[in-house]
Amino acid sequence: MGTPISSIRNLGPATEAAFARAGITSAEQVQAMGADAAYLALMNAGTAPHFIGYYVLVMGLQGRPWNDCLGDENTALRRRFDALKAQVTKKGRSEIEAALDALGVVERRRNA
């Protein structure tokens, strides 16, 4: 089974549950994937993209406090996050619905 994901700095039970929904069940798996691939797996499994969630994961995998990233490093992380978001396909949505959702105009569909 491996080491619990919640053993990674900054990550708790909610993140661990989200990873489980994505089929990722150990800290070793997350570490081997790296932050970008792991967060992409979360989004593809239905986790709504959120910069702070991504940021916390990146910092945790580096063994750093979640709020340790400032300035240019934070800006670079935002660019990486935006690029990851662009890779996610919204299942069951037209391109216009996905674009409106990204702008916060369309209410998110709930999975049944």
Image (cartoon, grey):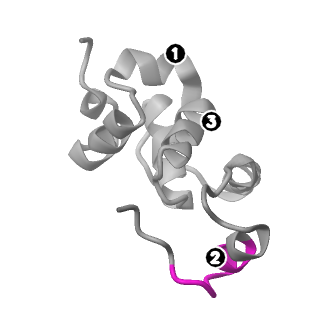
Q: Position of residue 57 (x, y in %)?
A: 47, 41
Q: Residues within 10 Å of mark 1 (few under 14, many from 20)?
A: few
Q: Gap in Å between the C-alphas at discs 1 and 3? A: 11 Å
Q: Is residue 89 above or below residue 99?
A: above
Is the residue under label 3 in contact with that under label 2 (CB below 8 Å)?
no
Q: Is residue 20 above or below residue 26?
A: below
Q: Gap in Å between the C-alphas at discs 2 and 1? A: 32 Å
Upstream in sequence: badge 2 or badge 1: 1
Magenta residues (range) = 99-107
Amino acid under label 3?
Answer: Asp
SS at badge 3: helix
SS at badge 1: helix
Q: Can residue 100 be found in the magenta stretch?
A: yes
Q: Is residue 29 above or below residue 20?
A: above
Q: Gap in Å between the C-alphas at discs 2 and 3? A: 22 Å
Upstream in sequence: badge 2 or badge 3: 3
**Which mark is on residue 32?**
1
Amino acid under label 2?
Answer: Asp
Nearer to me, 88 or 69: 88
Q: Which residue in the structure is indicated by mark 3?
A: 36
Quarter of the image with the N terminus is top left
Amino acid under label 1?
Answer: Ala
Q: Residue at x 39, y 28 (%)?
A: 23
**Which mark is on residue 112?**
none
Q: Residue at x 75, y 54 (%)?
A: 86
Q: Is residue 68 visible?
A: no
Nearer to me, 72 or 12: 12
Q: Which residue in the structure is indicated by mark 2?
A: 101
Mark 2 against mark 1, which lies toward the viewer?
Answer: 2
